[in-house]
Image (spheres, rainbow, N blue to C red):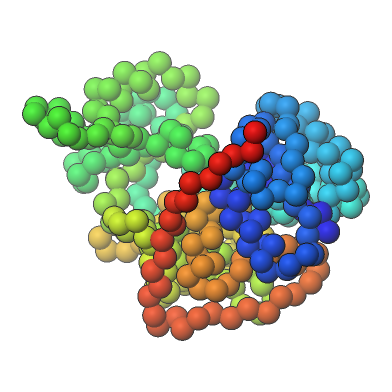
Amino acid sequence: MRIWFNQWFSTAYHLIELMRAGSPGKFTFVGSSANPNALYRLVSDEWYTEPALPVSDEYVEYCLEFCKAHHIDVFFPRRALTLLSRYREEFLAAGTKLAVGSDYKIMRLLDDKAATYAFFEARDASLVPAHLIAGTYEEFCAAYESLRPHCARVCYKLTKDEGAETFRVIDDTLLRSGDVRRKPGMKLTWDMARTVVRGYDFSVPFMLMPYLEGQEISVDCLRTPGEEIIIPRFKTNHRYSEVRFDEEIVEKCRTMMNLLQIDVPINIQFKGDGEKYCLLEINPRMSGGLQLSCLATGINVPDIAVHQLLGEEKTWQYPDRQKVYRVANLETPKRLKA
């Protein structure tokens, strides 16, 4: 069985290793990227450097032809998931199982943060935080002025965003003098935000909301025939995470999974607002920290997922869900292939 990972983050290194450990000798891993030094090249059985193509029908055609030429059985894309989901049947006709959600409408929904919030808010308003959508500069300023009296800080990002690329926190305490050790990071003052946004064309709207000061939770999920896999990973201020089966989080995720009906791994992110956990976003793919959830619980999510795509079932079970499991991602130096 040949499995293809393309255009992935470095976490694909761990995903491949987990699949290999779960099913020794069963899979051949094909890796590719436009970056010839991508980390998961180290654990790929075969490696190919891709052309740098935009997200377009041309990119879909490239992926389809690659699957045919290299006899790919299962394709785990990271890029252009929504677009690829439209061509699921074409990949099946080529003999390739596509590891993306099968419902194009749901995939489109999750690609737009405003649409995602509206979808869940219409079904259960408690699932999403207060937020406003701005389609013009004037609306952006009005939204900020409306939210600011009710929270310490306001944050914003485009409604179509990946990897928090456009996420910013408006923080006027940056103006304090003498704080030379403070790192601004993704923070900027209100005057700076207005200067940046004023020149934007608003082809994609902004979402503004109170910056949630509580703990961030990344939940790795997979629907299986018996029971949903739901692994809440609480991020800490230290170099470790805690897997804790908080009932509120688990029930929120179960509700969302039942509404979405996606049968491949997804990641649901929450953050606390002091009273409850609010949805941040849903990524319909394996997360960057999935290996931590697998290590903490002993549940090999990538291996279970690939077997489900192949029509096979792998048994699994939860550890003691009353316990808290701490797990750290330790960095080890590696020399890359020349």
**In the image, farthest residue toward the left:** 178
Q: Quadrant of the C terminus?
A: top right
Q: In the image shown, does 149 or 314 lie closer to the viewer? A: 314
On screen, 115 above or below 219?
above
| Residue 51 drawn at (x, y percent) | 73, 27
Q: Residue at x 61, y 69 (%)?
A: 300
On screen, 104 above or below 158?
below
On screen, 112 above or below 331?
above
Q: Quadrant of the N terminus?
A: bottom right
Q: Is residue 249 left or right of residue 67?
A: left
Q: In the image shown, does 321 or 161 lie closer to the viewer? A: 321
Q: Is residue 3 left or right of residue 10?
A: right
Q: In the image shown, does 184 or 253 lie closer to the viewer? A: 184
Q: Is residue 54 left or right of residue 322?
A: right
Q: Is residue 226 left or right of residue 268?
A: right
Q: In the image shown, does 79 or 101 lie closer to the viewer? A: 79
Q: Quadrant of residue 7?
A: top right
On screen, 42 above or below 56?
below
Q: Residue at x 59, y 39 (%)?
A: 336
**In the image, farthest residue toward the top:** 199
Could one spot residue 45 in this view of the protein? yes
Q: Residue at x 43, y 33 (%)?
A: 166
Q: Quadrant of residue 304?
A: bottom right
Q: Residue at x 79, y 55 (%)?
A: 28
| Residue 94 drawn at (x, y percent) | 90, 48
Could one spot residue 85 in this view of the protein? no
| Residue 75 drawn at (x, y percent) | 76, 50
Count the labels in the image. 0
Q: Quadrant of residue 38?
A: top right
| Residue 264 drawn at (x, y percent) | 67, 60
